[in-house]
Image (spheres, helix red, strand yellow):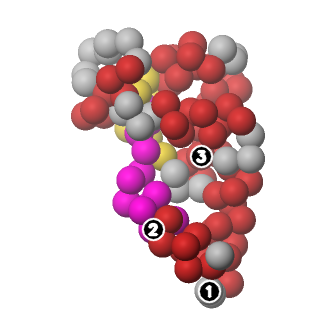
Amino acid sequence: MQAAEADHLVAVFKALGHPTRLAILGWLKDPASFPPQDRPAEEVGVCLKHIQARAEVSQSTASQFMATLQRANLVTCTRVGQWSHYQRDETEIALLRHLIGASL
């Protein structure tokens, strides 16, 4: 494993080291489980306000959680008007499965 790959895995594990961030990534597997929104969650992602409500945290805390997951390339963000919508980056998650399997 190259140093860059190892550094990336460390960032991912740190991002998933908080139970709420880990839960959010799990919840985003099923975007239809969130309340309806103007544009389908399967299309644009889940609105931050819905993630915030399910996590029972403040808006700023939810934003920080999502920024951490985004920096680790675990989620992508789509802006729809003033709202941020998040979805899992399945391509990146598949790559991580490969890297983890190769490193352990």
Mark 2 or mark 3: which comes first in sequence? 3
In this picture, is 98 found above or below 63? below
Q: Residue at x 59, y 37 (%)?
A: 66
User: Which amino acid type is marked by label 2?
Assistant: Leu
Query: Alpha-carbon neighbours of circle 1 within 10 Å: few (<14), some, or many (≥20)?
Result: few
Q: Position of residue 76 (x, y in %)?
A: 44, 46
User: Residue at point 70% right, 26% down?
Assistant: 61
**Disc 3 to disc 1, C-alpha distance:** 22 Å
Q: Position of residue 3 (x, y in %)?
A: 68, 84
- In this picture, which residue range is highlighted in magenta? 85-96
Residue occupying the far bottom of the picture = 2
Closer to us: mark 3 or mark 1?
A: 1
- Which label sits on residue 95? 2
Front-most of residues 35 and 76: 35
> Which of pointers 2 and 1 lies earlier in the amino acid sequence?
1
Q: Is residue 83 magenta?
A: no
| 26 left or right of 88 in image | right
Q: Which residue is mark 3?
A: 69
Give the label on residue 52, or none.
none
Q: How many marks?
A: 3
Q: Quadrant of residue 23?
A: top right
Q: Report helix, strand or loop for mark 1.
A: loop
Residue 27 placement (x, y as % from top left): 49, 31
Q: Nearer the viewer, mark 2 or mark 3?
A: 2
Against 76, residue 37 (above or below) is above
Q: Which mark is residue 1?
A: 1
Of residue 32 and residue 84, the one placed in the foreground of this image is: 32
Specify which label sits upstream in the sequence, 3 or 1.
Answer: 1
Could you tell me which secondary element the residue under label 2 belongs to?
helix
In the rendered image, residue 16, in percent from the top left (x then y), is placed at 67, 47
